[in-house]
Amino acid sequence: MRYCQPSCIRLSLVLLLIASGCSRSNPAPIPPKPLKVFFVKPVTQDVTEEEEFTGRMAATERIELRARVSGYLQELDFAEGKPVTSNQVLFRIDNRQFLAEEKRTAAAVSQFEARARRLESQESRARSLFEKRAMSEEEYEAIKYELTEAQASWKAAMASHETARLNLEFTEVRAPVAGTIGQRQVDPGNLVVADQTLLATIVPTDRLYVHFDMDERTVLRLRRMQQPGARQTALDEPVTVKIALADSEEFAITGVVDFQDNEIDPSTGTLRIRATVDNSGGLLSPGLFVRLKYPVGSPQSSLLIPEECLASDQGRPLVYVVATDAGRTIAAARYIEPGPMVGALRVIRSGLEIDDQVIATGLQRLRRNADITAEQMPDTSAASDGDKSERVPSEQKPDAPENKRPAEKGDFPTPA
């Protein structure tokens, strides 16, 4: 009887172990845990869509003060940059020569008036004598023509006197309207040339204009709304616009559109629009930069979702909604057409339904048709500021460090 050597036994055991290991199958990979997300439902609200433009304030009037007569500026009676009232005396020109001319013409009027009165009496007596045949017709006509000439001279003297009186009045330059006067352009003692020398400018500030340019696409959109059967717009009617100043995000000022130009500027492709703004409080000033919201059409029932629900696929806006596929809960991508902002919500023109459940968290980790577990976003309207950190679990916050990862290709795939 032959016995195996110990080395043979060991070799047999190793071969047996190898054979048993090769026959065993690899374990199945563990499926990833579904991502937990929170969703919101779209809300409906009547929304008037608005287009935003930029513009500039301008004065409703700009009056350039110029003298009506030539002379040396004697004094001024106003504070630069301050309000002035209508008919307030602002500048005075040396009036001595104009005063003397007014007196001379007044004396000439008295002289020609006396001569005309004397000839009127002569003509009355001559007519009586002529009717009694005590005066020839030639003598009577000579007196009558002399009276007519004297009356004409009297009228010419009165016209000259009126001109001299106006020139004397024009030596005082008055404010034609109430407003704010600018810096003086001439100092006292300088020669002022009639209708040429600019003295100062006045701009009324109780009402101001806002000029802005509307692009031709918006103009065409508004005009198409005016076609029969389309919803009405107010391009040709007074429209109330909202205005925000450069230092504010609030569109707290209102104005009324009262003018649109009659042609589109071919160099810019825009239509000039003007609105009038009340400035009784004195806050506004010509030249201010402003932003405007122009209403487009009438209020329409619209779907709105929070702005943070929006994602992007190569520039195309999309959202993820909760969907089911063969018993699985997945994240389905939907392309949408976003509209304007209404507070913290974004109007969605198309791509969503009222019953859709729009995913609001975990967007950086979502992929098309990825398995998810979804819960509705809790109502945080009554939460205090100190509880903001507890509104969404930290593992679901989009900005939490554990949720951040490098962007990968295919994060926002094109839906089928």
Image: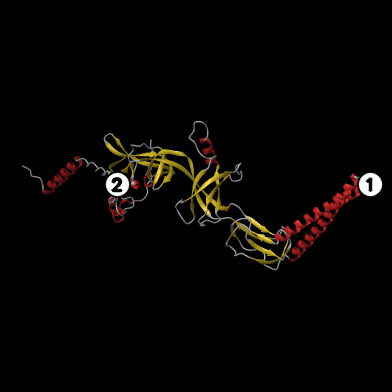
Q: Nearer the viewer, residue 160 or 42?
A: 160
Above or below 323: residue 145: below
Crowd tier of the residue under label 2, counting other residues whose Cα lies within 10 Å: few below 14, some 14–19, many 20 or above: few
Q: Nearer the viewer, residue 67 or 235?
A: 67
Residue under numbered circle 2 = 379
Which residue sits furthest left? 1
Q: Quadrant of residue 35?
A: top left
Tell me the quadrant of the picture where the N terminus can be found: top left
Q: The residue tagged with tag 1: helix, strand or loop?
A: loop
> Left or right: 380 with respect to 303?
left
Residue type at numbered disc 2: Asp
Crowd tier of the residue under label 1, counting other residues whose Cα lies within 10 Å: few below 14, some 14–19, many 20 or above: few
Residue 285: image x %, image y %? 54, 56
Residue 120: image x %, image y %? 84, 51
Which residue sits furthest front? 132
Q: Residue at x 34, y 40 (%)?
A: 321
> Left or right: 201 with respect to 333?
right
> Left or right: 62 with respect to 249?
right
| Tag in front: 2 or 1 | 1
Earlier in the chain: of badge 2 and badge 1, it is: 1
Q: Nearer the viewer, residue 383 or 275?
A: 275
